[in-house]
Amino acid sequence: MSFTVAIDGPAAAGKGTISRAVAAEFGFAHLDTGLLYRAVGAKGGDPVAAARGLTAEDLSRGDLRSLAAGQAASRVAVIPEVRAALTDFQRRFARAEGGAVLDGRDIGTVICPEAEVKLYVTASAEVRAHRRWLEVGGDAAQVLAEVRERDARDMGRAEAPLRPAADAVVIDTSTMGVAEAVQAAISLIRQRLPRN
Ligand code: DC
């Protein structure tokens, strides 16, 4: 059986937490697609060549979760040839036997428009910046400015901009606890899973 769950949304909205919980609950494979763009940005040099030659080793670098790596990822992600180089891998992953959950910015709109379940996980910029700040520390105003800058670039780019798919279910985690958001995602998926 192949069954794809597409989870999109802006930085620090809770996509990663929900994706991991969903993968654990249903035994699905999970791909954090942001990591692909982070690895391309961190590699340096020509981003198109980096995307075409991405290796497992590139994805296991220890510095991919930093704010700087997020900004670098967002910058290389506007390049159409970078996105094209990463598309096939993501689509193959999405159709893996046993089900898959992919989280990113364009999964429900571009990578897997046929996904069985599409979620758009969001929260206010202030709430997301506060969560990021709890993780990384530093200057809170600067973290908020970076969240806003990344949102503007990810939503404003010409190629595969971040937006909810027309048939996505929106989960706003501004006021919802993580456990509640995870439960909402799990019950929606359970309703849509084929009954043998
Ligand atoms: O989800 P993340 O914060 O790790 O993503 C880092 C950046 O990568 C994000 O700001 C934009 C880009 N990205 C993208 O363009 N498309 C995706 N499917 C995932 C991430």
Image (cartoon, rainbow, N blue to C red):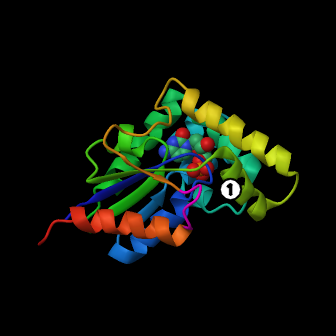
**Which SS type dominates the magenta stretch?**
loop
Residue 182 appears left or right of 71: left
Task: Work out whether residue 134 or residue 89 is closer to the camera in this orientation and state it.
Answer: 134
Q: Callout 1: few (<14), some (14-19), or many (20+) C-alpha neighbours within 10 Å?
A: many
| Numbered disc total | 1
Q: Quadrant of residue 5?
A: bottom left
Q: Is residue 10 shown in magenta?
A: no
Task: Work out whether residue 69 or residue 11 is closer to the camera in this orientation and state it.
Answer: 11
Q: Quadrant of residue 23?
A: bottom left
Q: Can I make out residue 176 in this image?
A: yes
Above or below 14: residue 69: above
Q: Residue at x 61, y 55 (%)?
A: 58
Q: Quadrant of the C terminus?
A: bottom left
Q: Where residue 153 sits in the image (x, y, percent)? A: 63, 31
Above or below 141: residue 130: below
Residue that numbered label 1 is attached to: 64
Residue type indicated by callout 1: Leu
Q: Can I make out residue 20 in this image?
A: no
Residue segment shown in magenta: 173-177
Residue 42 appears left or right of 22: right
Label 1 sits on a secondary structure element that is loop
Task: Work out whether residue 19 or residue 69 is closer to the camera in this orientation and state it.
Answer: 19
Q: Residue at x 55, y 26 (%)?
A: 157
Q: Quadrant of the N terminus?
A: bottom left
Above or below 170: residue 134: below
